[in-house]
Amino acid sequence: MAKEVKTEAKVCVGIEALWEALAKDLRILIPKIIPNSVKSVEVIEGDDVPKMSYQKEKIVELDESVHKFRLQVIEGGHLNFGFSSYKTTFQLTSIHEKETLVSIEITYESEVEDNNAMPSKTTMSTLALVKNLEEYLLNNVAV
């Protein structure tokens, strides 16, 4: 049975600039905003937790009309820690011209009973990534 963990954060970046960065340019930006954690991102298909040296994710949903996208781990990473399914969904909602609500949902299935802490850590890491992205966009791009 699938379980889920949800969180959200407000960022001081407009929805279109944030959507562009998260859904389209993230592969380029991640090594710039968290260089100590991510060396490179390679797109194979499609336009702090325990140390993971490798994780392959696939975009399984991308809906520009509602600013929503979902990533699914398909190899390595969380799957090496007993999860049979691990998906992260981002939903962006405009609050004001230069303020966006980022909703994050981790949906997972685990073969190991004691795996409930990792999704919560993933949400914290994902929130940190979003905040680092916000800082990067505010300092490096006209948003």
Image (cartoon, helix red, strand yellow):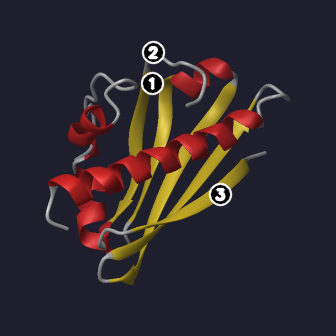
Asked whether 95 or 104 is in front, the reply is 95
Marks 2/3: CA–CA distance: 25 Å
Location of residue 74 with respect to 108 vertically, above or below: above
Q: Amino acid at mark 1?
A: Gln
Position in image of residue 140 (x %, y %): 16, 53
Q: Residue at x 30, y 62 (%)?
A: 18
Q: Residue at x 25, y 59 (%)?
A: 138
Q: Amino acid at mark 2?
A: Ser
Marks 2/1: CA–CA distance: 7 Å
Of labels 1 and 3, the one closer to you: 3
Position in image of residue 52 (x %, y %): 51, 19
For label 2, the residue is 53
Asked whether 24 or 30 is in front, the reply is 30
In the picture, residue 41 is in which quadrant?
A: top left
Marks 1/3: CA–CA distance: 21 Å
Q: Residue at x 36, y 23 (%)?
A: 36
Badge 1 marks a residue whose secondary structure is strand
Residue 55 marker: 1
Q: Are marks 2 and 1 in contact (CB under 8 Å)?
A: no
Q: Amino acid at mark 3?
A: Lys
Location of residue 84 with respect to 81 vertically, above or below: below
Residue at the extreme right = 113
For label 3, the residue is 6
Residue 105 located left or right of residue 2: left
Residue at the extreme front = 139
Of labels 2 and 1, the one closer to you: 2
Badge 2 marks a residue whose secondary structure is loop
Asked whether the viewer can see residue 141, the reply is yes
Q: Residue at x 28, y 45 (%)?
A: 26
- Sequence order check: which comes first, mark 1 or mark 3? 3
